[in-house]
Amino acid sequence: MGARRAVITGVGAVSAFGVGYDALANGLAAGKSAVGPIRSFDARTFPTRVAGEVPLDKTGASFLEKHRGMLLHVGEATAWEDAGLLRDRKVCFGLVAAAEAWRHARCGGAERKASLSIGLGLEQAFLEDLAEQLDGDEIRIGAGDLAGPEGVRFRSRVDLTAEKIRAVIGLSGRVAVHVSACAAGGMAVAHAASWIERGAADVVLCGAADSMVNPLGIGGMSRLGAPSPRAEPSACRPFDRRRDGLVVGEGAAMFVVEEESRARARGAEIFAVIAGHATTQDAYRATAPRPDGSRALAAMERAVRRANLRPADVGYVNAHGTGTQLNDIAEAKAIRALFGDVPTSSIKGAVGHLMAAAGAIELAACLLAFTRDLLPGTAHFEEPDPECPIHVIGPRPLAKRVDYVLSNSFGFGGQNVSVLLGRPR
Amino acid sequence: MRLDGKGLPVVAVSTLTAAGLSGPGLARRVLEDGIPSPRELAAPAPSRPEDIRQRKLMSRAAWFSALVMRGALAEARWDEGRDEIGAFFGVGASGAEMDEVARLVAASMVEGQFSLARCGREGLDACNPLFAFQIMNNFTLCHGAILEGLAGPNAAFFSRGAGTLTALEEACAAITSGACERALVGGADTALHPVTMAELEREGFLRQGLMPAEGAAALAITSEAEAPLGYVEAVRFFPVDRPRGALVPRTGVLRDAAVPAALDALEDQPCDVVVLAPWGAPAREALVDLPEMLEAELSVDASLSLGESLAATPALAWVLALDLLVHLDKHRALVLSAGPDGDLGAVVLTKGGA
């Protein structure tokens, strides 16, 4: 019996390009950028005023009902909205992307035993709720009368998106919620592949959802100094000499990942093989990546080794490429050291940094390499940086046929993950 | 996951509870001395107290985790090769200090109402710029990893029970697959954060008698060891159906699932000790008869003994079970956990020694 391999048979996405995987794929294939002024809240006085924002003002029941496929019960979405469950935008994004992936893979009753491995961002804090409890210089929240009324108050629960996806799709397998900051999406997909490989699951719905396009999310990132200070659509310019920070994005990407022979037996279309994956830790600083990129390099090296490949077999690297000074230099060093001149790009200039969902949306972007023989471009990249001596694909995608692509995600706190996808045979 | 042979050796443990920071010895405290009532634990003093960045940088759970990681590493004498040690933790919700949140909100008010415009202009500047790190719950894993130089494979799982079990399973998988030879695994959390307390109240857990606590536990596991404290024989998950929209499975359904799950995890072989880690009264009610049905000589309810420290509770229960085996010279223990992130979790542990 051959080794069990994990393959991707369905994908769904919600991004700044719009709802649906096609919106993402078409936007990237056209070399567009979807970063623009924040519309979902009035950010005029905020230090950061642009984002890769999903083009809708408000998430709610009507959004979910419009993007069907998840077998909502009558009145269910409205009840969730009334209870405050949909205030956190990532809940809707995750549900819609999961439903699309499930439908895309033509999953049915036989797949409902699937497990769920999902990367999720932080709880959304609701400042207006907290303000209601302000008493002098103290916020009075706690047990008993201080708990507030029924429903979601003060913050959404971290695993709310997972709970709703599990219920709505009707999954009966186990659930893992990765909270590894910006590495969470890649880790969730790697985990799904690992479950398949070792026989812990046959089908896994996996991916990630996040939105920090809210006052505390945008404000908190601004206080850290991570976003670009420029309120322009070109604010994020990964690997460009003039880069000055990231742009916050939001959205979700979900995949159906299953054991290859099972997928083939049911006639599912295979979009990619998850050939390798690995995680490492920088163990360096809370506020900065390891400057020599050595642990990022170790993650990439191990993912290649796990796939029984050589670095030269990898034809494209989808970089974490945040557009910050420190990340891009360290990552470029690591990519150069392992892969030399391999074509590399970051889609964060086009859709923003989706935080916990970054790795997932970027793996979705990587599928273009196999479905359209296109390597996504790096929006707003114009002036190469001598400190990033790698082959950066410019704003337009590169038409090229490759067999293996590698995607990096590195999280605040030093968590690194590399996932290697292969062209299906 | 069932491990081959005896299983994976556990060579050191460290816990932080209301009884303080300790290596082995939790069983004696539970059985003989008693554990003090759950209370707010003392977070360690920063090395440079005058540096506000140190005080504000991390959540309490991140500090707890760092403490037990350090304790387990010292106990295991893992001083070398830390670049390749893995770290897998179950973590809880964000733990931002409320005084920081209050400063932000207070500076954003206009005539008694929250003003978004003022929040952008003045509110954000009123809180510590490093406040964001308190909010990021993966720092419950990363803070300790950074301080201790653990640079191997890793993952942080949000846990309302099962996530911490996933951390243990992934640590075991990392070792058996050769991704690393040694790993720290555990959980750290606080149920005493005001927003978490409000959530537990609204979800009904406090009314049902849940005793909120805070704590942390870390176990050092490895591919081989000569005289370990014990072995992880199996880590098993049993998803349990629940009505759509329900927070937890029905008690009867959970009870019906628990017996076959326990027998399956134990492979129909006996165990001497059962440690239960139920989150909330319905889960406790579902599991309470299990030790008698399994004819275990001793059973302990970890959540009753130590309080409910959410993501930390399963890991504390594993340490308690290992410790009971050593303390009472017993051979085999089953730890059964059930939390609102669904699913029964079963860990089978055996006593180590030469």
Image (cartoon, coloured by chain):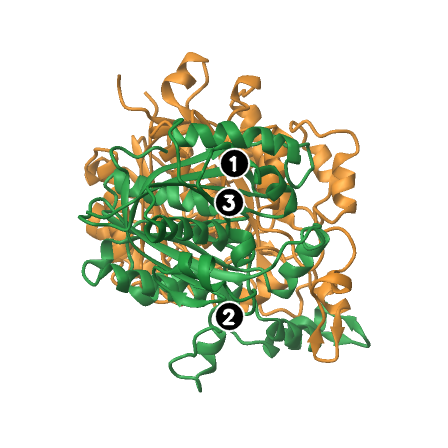
Which chain is represented by orange in the image?
A
Nearest the viewer among A131 and A322 is A131
Q: Quadrant of the N terminus of chain A?
A: top left
Instruction: Judge left or right: residue A103 versus residue B138.
Output: right
Q: Which of marks 1 and 3 is nearer the N terminus?
A: 3
Q: Quadrant of the C terminus of chain A?
A: top left
Q: Which mark is residue B292?
A: 1
For image coordinates 44% across by 83% down, the residue present is B51
Query: At numbered mark 3, what does the secondary structure look like: helix, strand or loop?
Result: strand
Disc 3: host chain? B
Residue, disc 2 = B41
Which chain is represented by green in the image?
B
Residue, disc 3 = B276
Residues tagged by mark 1 and mark 3 found on one chain of the structure: yes
Q: Which of marks 2 and 3 is nearer the N terminus?
A: 2
For image coordinates 77% across by 52% down, the residue present is A150
Residue extending farthest to the bottom is B50
